[in-house]
Image (cartoon, grey):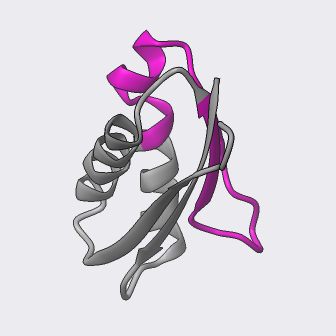
Amino acid sequence: MSKFTARIQLHSAAETDYETLNRAIEKDPAILKKKNLWVSPDKVNKGEYNYRGNISLSDVANAVYRAIRKTGRDYSFTVMKSKGG
């Protein structure tokens, strides 16, 4: 099982934009279909998600991208795969 960290920055975003992002990530069909785990960020690390599952780095990045698009904000993001995972 692989471990990933996704860090997302929404530019000029309000708290509600991050709430929209959280809901979109939690409801992504690719994630739900494979019963993978996303951990939503806390207030301090807003926009950081930890993920574990049997999925590729590309699939995780695509899920993050789809979620970000639902916010309508400009963005920056990175997805990292843990070494050995």
Q: Nearer the viewer, residue 54 or 46?
A: 54
Question: In the image, what residue occupies the spot 57% across and 22% down?
Answer: 36
- On the image, the x and y values in percent for residue 57 come to 41, 42
Residue 52 in the image: above or below residue 46: above
Question: In the image, what residue occupies the spot 47% across and 13% down?
Answer: 34
Question: In the image, what residue occupies the spot 35% across and 48% down?
Answer: 61
Q: Nearer the viewer, residue 15 or 24?
A: 24
- On the image, the x and y values in percent for residue 81 come to 56, 49
Q: Nearer the viewer, residue 61 or 31?
A: 61
Query: Is residue 29 one of those drawn in magenta?
Result: yes
Judged from this view, the residue extending furthest toward the bottom is 12
Question: In the image, what residue occupies the spot 45% across and 41% down?
Answer: 25
The magenta region covers 25-52
The answer to whether residue 81 is left or right of residue 82 is left
Judged from this view, the residue extending furthest toward the front is 84
User: Which picture quadrant has residue 5?
Assistant: bottom right
The answer to whether residue 2 is left or right of residue 11 is right
Query: In the rendered image, which quarter contains the N terminus?
Result: top right
Query: In the rendered image, which quarter contains the C terminus?
Result: top right
- On the image, the x and y values in percent for residue 70 come to 26, 52
Residue 13 in the image: above or below residue 65: below
